[in-house]
Image (spheres, rainbow, N blue to C red):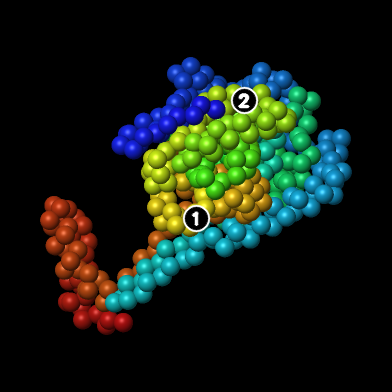
Amino acid sequence: MKIITFNAGDDITQATRCCRAETAFATSTVKETVEGIIKTVRQNKDAAVKQYTQQFDGYYPEELSFSDTNGQWQLADTLNKDIQRAIEVAYENIWQFHTALLPQAVTLDQNGIRLTREYRPIERVGLYIPNGTAPLFSALLMLAIPAVIAGCKEIIVTTPPNKDGTINPVLLYAARRCGIRTLYKVGGAQAIAALAYGTETIPKVQKIFGPGNQYVTEAKLQVSCDPQGAAIDLPAGPSEVLIIADSDSRASFIASDLLAQAEHDAKSRAILLTTDVNLANAVAREIKLQLETLDRKAIAQQSLENSVIIVAPDLDTCVRISNDYAPEHLILNISNPQACLKDITNAGAVFIGPWSAEALGDYACGPNHVLPTQGYAKSYSGLGPESFMKAMTFQEITAQGLLTLAPCVELLAELEGLSGHKNSVTLRRTYLQETSYELA
C-alpha cells in the first residue's frame, strides 16, 4: 500500500481524492451494455434472461425458477451442524436488532384534528444475491430478514447459478431459514431488468435490494430512473473500509481489517488514517505477511494497489478526512474512541475499539451490512426494516378542526393565487356557520 504524508493546512478534499482515486461506477461502455441488456429483457423476457445466463454464467436454465430437482433443496440439510449453528446465531442476532428498529405509528390529536403517520410494507420486493467470486449467503440474511419483519407479502430472490445449474447449499439453507421457498437462477444486469419489468416467470417487483458488480449497480440506477421500472435500496459501488489509528493501535489487527476488506473485490478500497508514521510502516509490513496467507490473495492484491495509508498530523485531521470521504465502514482503532464519536458525521457503520472487527458486523452482530459507498453515506443510511416499508399519513379533521384552520388556510391559499384551494375551505366554513352545525 502507498503511504502518503498529509500536512497541516493541506486541502482535506485532496486526501479524499487520494483515497478514491478511481471511480467505481460505470463507464460509458458499461452503461451502453446495460442499457442494451435491459431493452432486450423487456422485449424478450424469459428468452432473453436465459440467453444472457448462458452467455455470462455458462449455464442455460431450462427453468428459471429453482425447484427441488434431484433433491437440491435437501442439500441444505447435509450441511455441517457447525455451519447450521453459525447461521442460526447470525439469524437470531440480525432478527433481534432489526425487530427493535421496526418503526412505530405516531398520532397527534388536538383541536379537532387527528393526524397519524403509519408504515405499510412494500408488497413485492426483489432481492439480488451475488454468486460470483463467492456465494453471499450473508447478504441474503441481511436482506430477507428485514423484509420479513417489515411484512412484505412477496419476496422474490434472484441469484446467479453455478455452471452446473446448482445453487450453493449454504445459500439454500439461509434462504429456507428466512422462509424463502422460491429462488430464480439469474444474475447480472439481466436479473435486475427481470425484477424491474417482470417476465413470464419472474414477477415484477416494486423495489430492488442487494449488492452487485458495476453492471448490477448500473442496471439498478437505470431502472430506478424509469417510472415503469422499480425503486432501489441505495446506490452502491465496491465495498470500502477506513480505519483511524494512533500509536496505541496494534499493527496486526489493522492489517487484518484492511485485508478483510480488500479480499471482497479488486475494486474495494481499504484506507488507513494514522497519526503515527511508525504504525503506518508496521501495518504495511504486516499486510505483506498476512497477504500471503489469504485464499483470495490475487483479488486482495489488486485492491491494495488502489488503497492508501495516510499519515496525518493529528486525530482531528483524521476525523475531518474521514467525514469528507464518508466511508461505508469506519473503524476507530484508537486509545479513546469515545472522545471523537460526537465528531463523526458521515459513515455507513462505525466500529469502535480494537476488538470491533468489521467482519463481525458483516456476518453476525445484527446491524445491516448493506451500506452506502462512494461517499453516499453523507446522505444515505444502511438498510433496516423501514427500507422495506413506506410511510402514509392519515388526516381526520372534524368540523371544529376545519373552523380552527380555515382562516389560516384561506389566507395562505389566497397568497399563492389558488382560489380553488381557498374555496374548498370557505364553502365548508360557510355551511357550518349558516346551518348552525352542531360541533363535536
Does residue 14 appear left or right of residue 61 in this picture? left
Residue 131 seen = no
Which quarter of the image is occupied by the C terminus?
bottom left
**Residue shown at 54% from the left, 38% from the top:** 279
- The image position of residue 41, as x and y in percent, is 57, 25
Does residue 362 appear left or right of residue 334 in this picture? right
Q: Badge 1, how many Cα within 10 Å: few under 14, some, many 20+?
A: few
Separation of residues labelled 2 and 1 (CA atoms): 32 Å
Above or below 248: residue 414: below
Of 61 and 213, which appears nearest the observer? Answer: 213
Q: What element does badge 2 sit on?
A: helix
Q: Earlier in the sequence, mark 2 or mark 1?
A: 2
What amino acid does circle 1 point to? Asn
Above or below 150: residue 323: above
**Residue shown at 46% from the left, 25% from the top:** 22
Above or below 435: residue 376: above
- The image position of residue 1, as x and y in percent, is 55, 27
- The image position of residue 25, as x and y in percent, is 47, 27
Disc 2 designates what residue?
A: 301
Mark identifier at residue 336: 1
**Pair 2/1: label in front:** 1
**Residue shown at 39% from the left, 47% from the top:** 316
Of 339 and 166, which appears nearest the observer? Answer: 339
What amino acid does circle 2 point to? Gln
Residue that protrudes farthest toward the front in the picture: 278
Of 303 and 371, which appears nearest the observer? Answer: 303
Q: Quadrant of residue 297?
A: top right
- The image position of residue 159, as x and y in percent, is 67, 34
Q: What element does badge 1 sit on?
A: loop
